[in-house]
Amino acid sequence: MLNSFFKQNKRVKIAGLASLLLLMLSITGCSVKAPRQAAIASAHPLATQAGFEILQQGGNVYDAAVAVSAALAVVEPSGSGLGGGGFWLLHRESDDLDIMIDGREKAPLAAHKTMFLDTTGMADKQLSLNGVLAAGIPGMPAGLVHLSEKYGKLPLAVSLQPAIRYAEQGFQIDARHQKLLGFRQAILNQHPETAAIFLDNGQIPEKNSLLQQSDLAQTLKQIAAKGHAGFYQGSIADKLVNAVQQDGGIWTLKDLRKYQIVERQPITGRYKDIKITSAALPSSGGTVLVESLNILENIDLQAVDNITRKHLIVEAMRRAYHDRALYLGDADFVNVPSERLINKHYALGLSSTIRTDKAIPSDYLTGQIQEKQGGRNTTHFSIIDNQGNRVAATLSINFPFGAGLVAEGTGVLLNNEMDDFVSAKNSGNGYGLVGGDANAIAPEKRMLSSMTPTFLQDNQRIAVLGTPGGSRIISMVLLATLDFAAGHSPESWVNVKRFHHQYIPDQILYEKHGLSAEEITGLQALGHQLKPYYNYGNMQAVQLDKANNTLSAASDPRGEGQASVQQINE
């Protein structure tokens, strides 16, 4: 029977000896348990290794997510950290559970709507971007504890061990770390505690220099030993509040004590035969992604030339980002018409306003607002096992190295996520995003985010993906989703050339070589303004092919991450 199989299937390609053995055993009628495998893609090789280390110790994908999150807080301090927050999107195959852990930062109790305005009523971006007033109450530590205690198998102390080791023993910094230090060097030098950790006598350390963070290791040990209380109460909380208040900030111990994780139902939708599961408010990611795809579902993108296709995608982005600015904010504080925004009938109406021969200017939708320049950092990782359990997590401290301030004795870099609120009318945030009263500052409110951890699923495949990139996160995930719909692999999704429109400013932003000369000329002829940009994003993606139970993974070539598939020892 096996000879017959080989004669009839000479051209069949089967990935790996284990897969071939399973297939042959199924033909002969034997039953065998599939070897446990997992795929991890993250923004740093040490974080990917930390995830597999915990899986090999008997942890599940949620334990691995704790390990990767904590490791990134140590080895990629420009993108995330214990002083920041994020969203963990989970799927548990045993009971088909989809849930989002909301670890977004919150405004302090003393925060108020006009706290970043100058005497003329204009927004002072230095206050919302640099220093202690820019920092929201962190959610990352609470997220790690919640993820471990509710969904993991291993003790939190075990899952945090790789991160503790990296902090204590140190790791070699890379070129990307150096570049991001350079972007914030002047701010870091304003804070001696920060400069002492990350700079060398005020200068950028040499490549491959060892970065050790002993205070951060001690903070991680406190969380490992005491859980939530290890960060939000006791000695660490005292040090955080003292550091903030001594620098003119408004945090109190009550702010920290009151911080809690919220579990939320993800945003779901469909694009053709693909189920989309993505981030819910206070992230705008899922809503804008699904709305954009709903608009595009009414358009045959395959029936038009390449220039028109990009034009139509841009017009969908424009309309969805317009609704982001008008309506979206923390749904615990404001009424958001979420169901309407992701309704296919609503999208049909929006698609009817799109012309194939002409760009519709954004000021036809509402008034123009000038772009604000800003930073570009956050991080993402994706994990899946061959049973379908999965995690997509996007984590951030906002700008590279957050607010630039390390709280003395903690190793914790404070975020500058308060800038993601709307400070004043006609004022964009650091990424140029605009908004209204729905995203105004209020005590204990969570600021609107663009982070878009996402699952895609059709009859054959399950994808887990996401990326950093500020306001451009959603458009990157949108382009990757369209590439998934075209049948391509994770390697293709992370390599897709990127272009972006966010309603205001009214221009197509495109990465270097992201558009051809012919496409640029063609889009300009349709009335678009275009602006070239550096190669942005750092997408991390994994996939399970359900047909043959094989995994694949890819890490964005624009970054220095690592994607891997490994068999897990039982």
Image (cartoon, grey):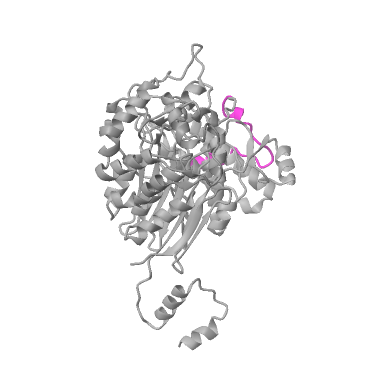
Image: magenta residue range = 342-367
Quick one: quadrant of the N terminus? bottom left
For the residue pair 24 and 405, the one nearer the viewer reads as 405
Task: Indicate whether 54 appears above or below 133.
Answer: below
Q: x and y percent of residue 370 in the render?
A: 59, 25
Q: Nearer the viewer, residue 377 or 330?
A: 377
Q: Residue at coordinates 35% horizontally, 77% vertically from top-left?
A: 31
- Asked if one can make out residue 263 in the rendered structure from this viewpoint, the answer is no
Q: Where does the image place residue 444, in percent across and percent down from the top left?
A: 34, 28
Number of numbered discs overlaid on the protein picture? 0
Q: Is residue 548 above or below residue 542?
A: below
Determine the image quadrant of residue 568.
bottom left
Q: Is residue 26 magenta?
A: no
Q: Residue at x 25, y 38 (%)?
A: 229
- Residue drawn at x 68%, y 50% is 306
Q: Quadrant of residue 144?
A: top left
Question: Taking 152 as reference, is 517 left or right?
Answer: right
Q: Is 315 on the left or on the right of 333, as rendered?
A: right
In the rendered image, which quarter contains the C terminus?
A: bottom left
In magenta segment, residue 355: yes
Q: Position of residue 332 (x, y in %)?
A: 34, 32
Q: Position of residue 518 (x, y in %)?
A: 74, 46
Which residue in the rendered view is the most extreme toward the top?
Answer: 119
Residue 140, above or below 543 = above
Residue 425 at least partly seen: yes
